[in-house]
Amino acid sequence: MNTGEGWDWNRALQLMPGRWTEVADELYSFSGELHRRGCREVYDLGCGVGRHTIFLARQGFTVSASDISPSAIEHTRAGLEQAGVDATLQQLDMRDWPFEDCCFDAVVAYNVVYHAMRGEVEAVLAGARRTLRPGGLLFITFKSTLDSEYGKGRELAPFTWAPLSGVEQDVAHYYVDEAEAKRLLKDFELLSMVHKQELPVSGESPRQRAHWIVRAARPE
């Protein structure tokens, strides 16, 4: 797969600094669940500037992380060093899974897999299932069709749009409703699925963000 350059994270941090550096609220409870289950090996797919990679490493997990963007890897590496923790980092396209079967206890894919076409999202989920151990956990988010950006920009395919400007200009966004989210996860055991709508954060243009927050497991 083509790894490309991905986002310019220096620009993204300038435009919306808080959005990319704060740990998502849901990760705190997910971390607790991982500890209760005795999970150790965690993969942070599409790590961005490392907010969840660093958090999980601080929680004592053995963390692997990847991102398509070299600037993301640079920021994550610097953040790990500053925090005094370690993780294994690789620059990878999210569709690439150069890992052995059943090597992770959990995969975290926060606000990443929907930056693709439908078939590519399916390929990412197949990679996650293959590399999770039986009973391993998947924490993933999908972009909801109730997001205010749905139907805006350049239409690439059904339910798939690319913004015409901003940090995500020309980046595919695949939007799903509840039925499609469940279809995508048909090879997993669905543990929970919450529809989350967010108000704009400071400095952003007015919009209504909407995601599906999902916890699933590879069947035993």
Image (cartoon, helix red, strand yellow):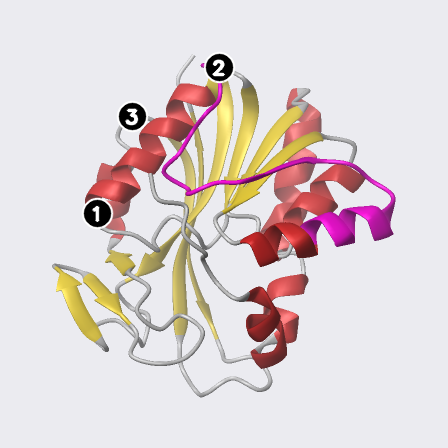
Disc number for residue 102: 2
Up the image or down, 72 lies above or below 98; here it is below
Disc 1 on helix, strand or loop? helix
User: What type is the residue that disc 2 sits on?
Assistant: Cys
Distance from Cα at disc 3 to Cα at disc 1: 16 Å
Up the image or down, 213 lies above or below 12; here it is above
Q: Quadrant of the N terminus?
A: top left
| Residue 113 placement (x, y as % from top left) | 38, 48
Q: Give left or right: position of 175 versus 194.
A: left
Segment colored magenta: 76-102
Disc nearer the start of the sequence (3/1): 1
Disc number for residue 118: 1
Classify mark 3: residues with Cα within 10 Å, few (<14), some (14-19) or many (20+): some
Residue at 64% x, 74% y: name it: 17
* Figure quadrant of residue 160: bottom left
Classify mark 1: residues with Cα within 10 Å, few (<14), some (14-19) or many (20+): many
Up the image or down, 14 lies above or below 41; here it is below
Q: Which of the two marks, 3 or 2, is nearer to us in this view? A: 2
Distance from Cα at disc 3 to Cα at disc 2: 15 Å
Q: Nearer the viewer, residue 158 or 191?
A: 158
Residue at 65% x, 48% y: name it: 52
